Image (cartoon, rainbow, N blue to C red):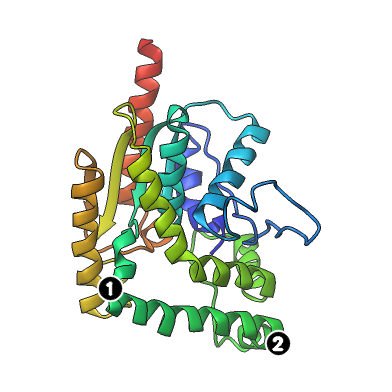
């Protein structure tokens, strides 16, 4: 999905601090590199892997000239990227917040690999094909499919933007690539966590719901929950774990209020620390 999933979070927090969200390369309205373009990191990181995405983000933040340090928030695959960024550029991050992080060990489990490569990836490829052939546009016109972000507080502009991206094969292709290489991204994050541990200066928070994904079978959710606990205990034993009842990975745009309480508290703490210094 695009950065629109952060709409509620961004609107709420922007009343007390500066909040930035972005579309990763190839997603939303961020175009992919042309064949003759280069960022200079192609030989280091594979396309659509966490290492490459973090390098893109670092260059983006430098170009935007944002004040540092900052609170870095990421969800699912974004949590991979946020972890990687915080380990490499730890002096720039005061707080790392991971929302329903995917534990890298999940790809060692046959049950998850069957779901990921046998169900999720084919469904994303089907969306890409549907967008490329114009079928998605027809289904939207007929009312057979709806944008994922809907509701009374969602403007018509956002709804139309979602419809456009659903029909955009380039956006759908970017999603396919990121998910296809997620196992490689997991390996990159695992390696950087071992070779360059986070310093004690960085506060870590983990936000999870009752399930990783309420649409998944219970056995898959239980497996992810167990692996998340192991991952937290082994990788970030001092992390603050926030549990939100009745939520899953879609909490960012479907149930943001409880999550926003924690983020607001973090912002106020950092602002108080800055004033005291």
Identify which residue, 39 or 265, lies in the foreground. 39
Q: Residue 259, how many percent across, how many down?
A: 33, 49
**188 on left or right of 129:** left
Q: Residue furthest top?
A: 277
Distance from Cα at disc 2 to Cα at disc 1 = 35 Å
The reply to whether callout 2 and callout 1 are in contact (CB within 8 Å) is: no
Q: Residue 40, how many percent across, how many down?
A: 69, 46
Label 2, on which residue?
A: 133
Residue sitting at x 40%, y 76%:
116
Q: Does 135 appear above or below 128?
A: below
Residue sitting at x 55%, y 57%:
4
Is residue 241 something that shows in the picture? yes
User: How many numbered markers are drawn?
Assistant: 2
Is residue 242 something that shows in the picture? no
Residue sitting at x 45%, y 54%:
78
Q: Residue 179, how many percent across, how many down?
A: 49, 69
Q: Residue 124, how many percent across, how many down?
A: 53, 78
Residue 226, quarter of picture: bottom left
Q: Does 179 appear above or below 115?
A: above
The mark closer to the camera, 2 or 1, is: 1
- State the mark number for residue 109: 1
Identify which residue, 186 or 134, lies in the foreground. 186
Q: Earlier in the sequence, mark 2 or mark 1?
A: 1
């Amino acid at each position: 999905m695009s950065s629109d999933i952060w709409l509620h979070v961004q609107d709420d927090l922007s009343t007390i601090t500066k909040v930035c969200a972005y579309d990763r390369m190839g997603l939303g309205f961020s175009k992919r590199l042309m064949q003759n373009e280069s960022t200079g990191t192609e030989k280091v990181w594979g396309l659509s892997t966490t290492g490459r995405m973090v390098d893109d983000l670092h260059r983006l933040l430098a170009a935007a000239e944002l004040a540092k340090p900052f609170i870095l928030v990421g969800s699912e695959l974004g949590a991979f990227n946020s972890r990687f960024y915080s380990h490499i550029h730890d002096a720039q991050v005061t707080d790392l917040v991971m929302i329903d992080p995917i534990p890298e060990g999940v790809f060692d489990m046959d049950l998850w690999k069957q779901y990921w490569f046998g169900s999720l990836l084919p469904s994303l490829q089907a969306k890409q094909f549907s967008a490329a052939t114009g079928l998605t546009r027809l289904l939207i016109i007929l009312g057979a499919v709806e944008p994922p972000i809907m509701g009374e507080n969602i403007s018509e502009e956002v709804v139309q933007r979602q419809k456009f991206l659903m029909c955009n094969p380039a956006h759908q292709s970017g999603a396919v690539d990121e998910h296809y290489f997620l196992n490689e991204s997991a390996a990159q994050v695992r390696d950087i966590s071992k070779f360059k541990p986070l310093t004690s200066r960085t506060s870590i928070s983990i936000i999870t719901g009752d399930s990783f994904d309420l649409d998944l079978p219970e056995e898959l959710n239980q497996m992810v929950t167990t692996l998340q606990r192991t991952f937290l205990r082994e990788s970030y034993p001092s992390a603050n774990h926030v549990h939100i009842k009745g939520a899953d990975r879609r909490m960012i745009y479907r149930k943001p209020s409880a999550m926003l309480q924690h983020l607001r508290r973090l912002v106020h703490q950092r602002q108080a620390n800055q004033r005291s210094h």
